[in-house]
Amino acid sequence: MINKVLIANRGEIAVRIIRACREMGIETVAVYSEADRDALHTQLADEAICIGPAESTQSYLNMERIISATIISGADAVHPGFGFLSENAQFVRLCEKCNITFIGPTAEVMEKLGNKSVARNTMVEAGVPVIPGSAESIYDVETGAPIADQIGYPVIIKAALGGGGKGMRVAETPEEFASAFQMAQKETQMAFGDNTMYIEHFVQHPRHIEFQILADEHGHVIHLGERDCSIQRNHQKMVEESPSMALSDALRKSMGEAAVKAAKAANYTNAGTIEFLLEKNNNYYFMEMNTRIQVEHPVTEWVTGIDLIKEQIRIADGQELRHTQEEVQITGHAIECRINAENPAKNFRPSPGTITELYMPGGKGVRIDSAIYSGYTVPPYYDSMLAKIIVYARTRSEAIKKMRSVLGEVIIGGIDTNIDYQYEIMNHPDYISGNIDIEFIEKMQG
């Protein structure tokens, strides 16, 4: 039985995990960098251990220090949250070696799905629709150019390892291929210390649709419906919602079954997300699988009533899923807006600093996931997300109106935020009508 969980993360996701553990009667251990000494997660956990300087490579990405903190504290499990070490197979192996339960999939599965080329080939073998692309890893222009010709332009060159929009370039024509490949590979090398690339057909004007899955160690796999994550900037999501108005019941059933098939093909366990690109003609393609909890998981929790963090812990504890596919019901509509410390008017420049004034509204159907407080100093070293505002209502139209109301009440003084920008999105005619795709932000900015 899991009795004590160390949270190998920070910010709102660490707070979210601590609260779930507290409700389950599980003790918690927070780890923090010197920059996060006064962070909320360090104050809420039962114990808190400093693991190093502000730089994430010396703290939140330092596997040895986190493993040491786990052993010293007597924690029997680690929850990685998202980002940092959440998709690092080497860290999972270290946990296994030290007899620590990792709340997530196995290292073997993580390696298989973390490499985009291997993941793609796994899906092809399972019969899951994939975007036409290279079957093997590519390391140079000479090898890639004829493959791009065969796939058909436009093509997108991607990092085989990594994510977050890093190491990606589009080539519209054969003449653009060489420079696009070299730029993508250079960025990949700098971001991930790896130069392995792969190429695929570039799907134009798609929606980004992802399906949440849960899989236990006893062979049971279910999906919890979809999230529409099409509103994104530089491949990073800004607004997420569920359900997607682009999906008919038949299409939702088809994509959900494909998501379950994908998870089974990888022998996946715990919570994960199957990401698809959906074309306007309703063709959909597997893009990748995220082997962790997602930032936008509260959207799914609203419309299904299932607590994903608690389910993660139960699955890691060896328990069977508590729900069958037939029992999963999607009701109402949920929207999440990410509130970041940034200035959209100045090319989204990060805005660290001290919060001098803070008001977060509440009310029926309003959820705020955050770790900030008045007087808290937002450090410049980490992701700029301050909070997630999630609303729930009977219909999409009602949810949009609720989100506008909440955004209009939020006060975060002392630093710049993207609250007004999110308000603009909620009032944009194309967003209201549902005429959106992954290029929405580019079009909105003109």
Image (cartoon, rainbow, N blue to C red):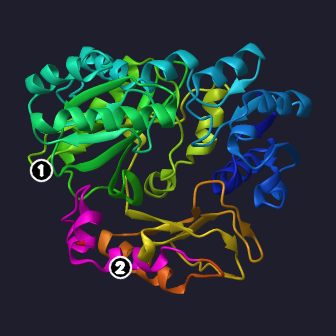
- Judged by its main secondary structure, the magenta piece is helix
Residue 307 point in image, percent of width and height: 57, 48
On screen, residue 424 above or below 220: below
On screen, residue 68 above or below 407: above
| Residue 354 is a magenta residue | no
Quick one: 94 or 55, which is closer to the camera?
A: 55
Between the residue at mark 2 and the residue at mark 1, the CA separation in whole angstroms equals 25 Å
Q: Neighbour class for label 1 at 10 Å: few (<14), some, many (≥20)?
A: few
Q: For mark 2, what is the residue?
A: 424
On screen, residue 58 above or below 335: above
Which residue is at a point 50% across and 32% down the rendered structure image?
192
Quarter in which the C terminus is drawn:
bottom left
Q: For mark 1, what is the residue?
A: 280
Identify the amino acid type marked 2: Glu
Q: Secondary structure at mark 1?
A: loop
Specify whether residue 201 is in view.
Answer: no
> Over which residues does the magenta segment extend?
416-445
Quarter in which the N terminus is drawn:
top right
Which residue is at a point 34% across and 74% down the rendered structure image?
425
Identify the amino acid type marked 1: Lys
